[in-house]
Image: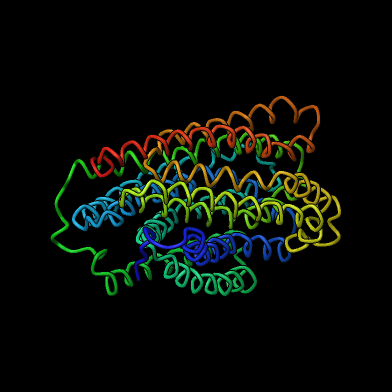
Amino acid sequence: MTGNMTEGSPVKLILKFSLPLLLGNLLQQAYNMIDAAIVGQVLGADALAGVGASGSVQFLVLGFCIGICAGFSIPVAKYFGAGREDRLRTCIFHAYLLTALFAAVITTVTALLCNNILRIMSTPDNIYSDAYSYLLIIFLGIPFMLFYNLLAGIMRAVGDSRTPFIFLAVSTVLNIFLDMLLIMVIKLGVAGAALATVMSQAVSGISCFVYIQKKYPLLRISRDMFRFNRFAIRELFIMGVPMGLQYSITAIGSMVMQSANNGLGSDYVSGFTAGSKLKQLAMCPFDAIATGVSVFSGQNLGAGNDKRIRRGILSGIAIGTAYGAAVGLMLILFGRPLSLMFVKSSETAVLDASGKYLMCLGIFMWLIGILNTCRMTIQGLGYSAVAIFSGAIEMAARIIVSKAFVPKYGFTAICFTDQSAWLTATIYCSIVCAVCVRKVTQKIREGKVIRI
């Protein structure tokens, strides 16, 4: 069922939209968390380090994939809000074409370069084999991940965040079963964890496609859509690629950070991996709220309602910062005990590293409420190219701290690298968001918001 966000309370609409998306994000993180928990508890700390040693590389590649799919959904939201079904369907068809192209290219390139990537990342020799097996299988599963994120993004663009969550919930249960089967019964090691993730993502993507074809006449693929339109390609490319690059540029800084951390030894790699899993879980609500604001802004951009756009942004920031303060306090107080989900109690050095990392993160978590809301709003209003610079700022901050301070201060510097990126990017995005809203307001008053 589609959802119109051009009427009604912004806070209620954003929260209603964000709740299923939040649950879906939590389940998506559960893929990796379940892998990490079973790998750490069953196979040991070195195997956990093997899974986590390439985390930033996965963020680089998979983040680009998620970003382009999110970008493809922006015109869908805009044309849905404007009531332009012809342009909406044209965008959907060409989004399928572009996604298939990106899937083929990205999968081929990453699979071929997997060995080189891990060497560049200074992956310790004692965990290299596990890291390679896990990363290669994840890369080979990129088409399934792209397929799900494209379809989920399209449904969310028309206001339905519940259906993607339902299918993701089913596939998460399947992931748990496959983890136990492939790791604990068939004894495939970390390769089994990666296979479980890829197979589960395939199920969620295929389920979304079948559902759309049966239940969404507006969104289903049909022969009347099979007409090449270079303007649609251009619009999707302009929206999708900058969003993908923004994720990837951010990840480059994370790769430098992880490479610096890998050089500190496997205890710190394991501690950083455990802490990162909890950090990713804690950040899910930020992404859900920001995506809700982005869709809200996109639909109201199409409807030509600039006042509602501003109200939505302020509501998103208020919700995000309140949550950030609460979850930050939890990480400060309970970060180390929560790390026991992934690490045995006997691994005290690993637990200490994870607890320290999470405590330092918790102090600054409220910043993400502002950063994500402003950045996603910029993208939702059609200024994806501008958002790239926020990723570049984050990248620069992480690289500077990793190169200048980690050699001297070790893991302590790692614990403050993310925060330096968040602070600098928040300042930039807050200013740019205000400028973009002002430009959109002018376009709305001139009647130009739907032109390609």
Instruction: State the residue in front, 12 or 21.
Output: 12
Which residue is depicted at the point 59% across and 37% down?
Answer: 426
User: What's the image's color scheme?
Assistant: rainbow
Instruction: State the residue in front, 384 or 320.
Output: 320
- In the picture, measured across the screen, residue 130 lies left or right of residue 15, that is right
Which residue is depicted at the point 31% across and 47% down?
Answer: 101
Instruction: State the residue in front, 64 or 263.
Output: 64
Which residue is depicted at the point 50% across and 54% down?
Answer: 138
Instruction: State the residue in front, 346 or 83.
Output: 83
Picture quadrant of residue 405: top right
User: Looking at the picture, how far across and down is residue 359, in whole percent?
Assistant: 78, 48
User: Looking at the picture, how far across and down is residue 367, in whole percent?
Assistant: 64, 43
Q: Residue furthest top?
A: 404
Give the quadrant of the C terminus. Answer: top left
Picture quadrant of residue 162: bottom left
Give the quadrant of the N terminus. Answer: bottom left
Check the image and report above or below for 415 versus 220: above
User: Looking at the picture, how far across and down is residue 68, in whole percent?
Assistant: 39, 46
Picture quadrant of residue 327: bottom right
Tell me how many marks there are: 0
- In the picture, measured across the screen, residue 122 lies left or right of residue 224, that is right
User: Looking at the picture, how far across and down is residue 164, in whole percent?
Assistant: 43, 67
Which residue is depicted at the point 37% across and 39% down?
Answer: 441
